[in-house]
Image (cartoon, helix red, strand yellow):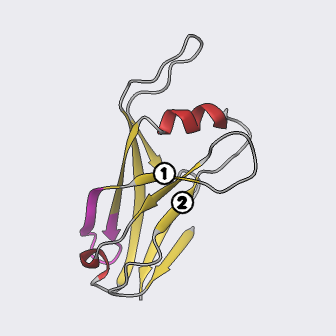
Amino acid sequence: MQTFYINQHSTLPHLKMELIQDGRHDFNKFHDFIQDCTITFTMVNKQNNRIKIANADAYLELKNHIGCVDQYLICYNWKTRDVNEKGVYDAYFVIKSNGNLTSETDTFPQGSLIVPIEEKLEIVIQ
């Protein structure tokens, strides 16, 4: 499980997630694909199962790295109302294809992809 800690009433640091490079997928194509997608962020209180944030706009940020291919982080900027209650929350990003990206050799998936895939994201507001 990935755990992100933030203080109550604080909007920093911003939430940033790196996509996992597992060697089984062509990451160059995936990074091209997500640039033409809508990305949202959702956060649910683990204790009472109430949604704290529902489908809020998230964004991509160019990752600082050494290499020739641009890579991105999936990010969310906290609002004061997001962090006004202490607690532990399950959270996830949804990448929704806008269906506009195809090439001669590839058709990219349609629909939604929930991130993170391999392990859950937990937000702790302390």
Magenta residues, as a range? 43-56
Q: State the residue at coordinates (48%, 19%).
A: 102
Q: For the stretch drawn in magenta, what is the main secondary structure? A: strand
| Residue tagged 2 | 17
For mark 2, does the 10 Å Cα neighbourhood hold few (<14), some (14 to 19), or many (20 or more) residues? some
- x then y, percent, for residue 18: 59, 56
Q: Earlier in the sequence, mark 1 or mark 2?
A: 2
For mark 1, does the 10 Å Cα neighbourhood hold few (<14), some (14 to 19), or many (20 or more) residues? many
Q: State the residue at coordinates (70%, 54%).
A: 65
In the rendered structure, the answer to whether residue 47 lies left or right of residue 12 reads left
Which quadrant is home to the C terminus?
bottom left
In the rendered structure, the answer to whether residue 64 lies left or right of residue 125 reads right
Q: Of 114 and 9, which appears nearest the observer?
A: 9
Q: Of 48 and 94, which appears nearest the observer?
A: 94
In the rendered structure, the answer to whether residue 75 lies left or right of residue 87 reads right
Q: Of 11 and 92, which appears nearest the observer?
A: 11
- x then y, percent, for residue 1: 57, 67
| Residue tagged 1 | 115
Element on which disc 2 rests: strand
